[in-house]
Structures are given as structure tokens and as C-alpha cells.
Image (tube, grey):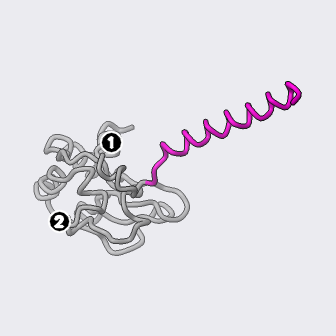
Amino acid sequence: MPDSLVFFFALILIVGLVALLSFSRFRPLNDPKTIARLSKKPFGPLLAAQVADRLATGNSMRYSHKDYCGQGLLYRDGCYVIAEFADGEPFAAAVGTWTDKDSFVAFLASQSDFSCSGTDSTSTLFHTTEPHYVNNQRISGKRLQEFASGA
């Protein structure tokens, strides 16, 4: 076999192996191994209070793009609200509403990446059986920290 043909097949083999290894590390957001790695550490009262303060100034924590945007937070009509968003706007009844800061902070402080992912069957507010919504653009510690810092 000519050297150029051997080189060509070796190159194809290498590219295929790299692609296989790359894609094997990618797991869907609702994959059991991905869910198992979600933090169960509560967000805590400090971060929750910082988020509440930022919400009260009129800022909202939401993704804003076409179609389903996941869950986010806003302050509307004197209430702290967790809502589902689509096209950057709330599209359904609120997931949860609190009329006072202290109760909202207490609730948010006790949540975690895992409880907000939709997988935790003990989390009546967040639990879902719809695979598309599990861990898909949900509230997380990382999103809360970025929001609280103004990022």
C-alpha cells in the first residue's frame, strides 16, 4: 500500500478517535451521571440576601433568547418570583412567589443546584418528570453568584 494511503487511513483513524473521545465526555444535562455531580450544598443566606437585594432594584435573573429560557427570578408587584421563561419573558404562572424578603431569602438559602435541577422529588417547587426541563437552564449557584455580583 502506498505511504500516502497509509497516512490517509491513519489520519482518518486519529480524527475518528479524537471525535469519539470528545463526544463521549459530553453528557446531556439530564444524564444521571451529570445529575449525580450536582452540588447539594445549600446556597446559603448571604448569597440569597444578595440576590434578593439585586432583584428589589428592578434587575431580573433570566436568560433571554428564542424559545425556552428555563427558570429565572424577578421582583414584580412587590413580590419575589421564580418563573419559567420563554423568549426572555415569563410564560406561565409563577413557580413560586414570596411577598416578603425574609421568607424568600430563607427559601432560596436552603436550595442547591440539585434541588433546583428538577430531579429532586422532595422539592415540590422545582421537581419535574419532563426530561427536557431537567437541569435545563435552571437556577444554580453559579448563576446566582454571577447575578449577585452584577456580572
Q: Kindly identify which residue carries mark 2.
A: 122
Cα–Cα gap, marks 1 and 2:
22 Å
The chief SS type of the magenta part is: helix
- Under circle 2, the secondary element is loop
- Quarter of the figure with the C terminus: top left
Q: Is residue 139 above or below residue 47?
A: below
Decide whether residue 111 is among the magenta residues: no
Looking at marks 1 and 2 on the same chain, the residue that comes earlier in the sequence is marked by 2
Decide whether residue 14 is among the magenta residues: yes
Q: Residue 105 versus residue 31: which sits nearer the camera?
A: 31
- Quarter of the figure with the N terminus: top right
Q: Kindly identify which residue carries mark 1.
A: 142
Q: Give the farthest residue toward the front.
A: 1
**Residue interval drawn in magenta:** 1-28
User: Which amino acid is tagged 2?
Assistant: Thr
**Quadrant of the rendered structure where residue 125 is?**
bottom left
User: Which amino acid is tagged 1?
Assistant: Lys
Residue at image position (67%, 33%) is 14
Q: Position of residue 132 (x, y in %)?
A: 44, 66
In this rendering, would 33 be left or right of 2?
Answer: left
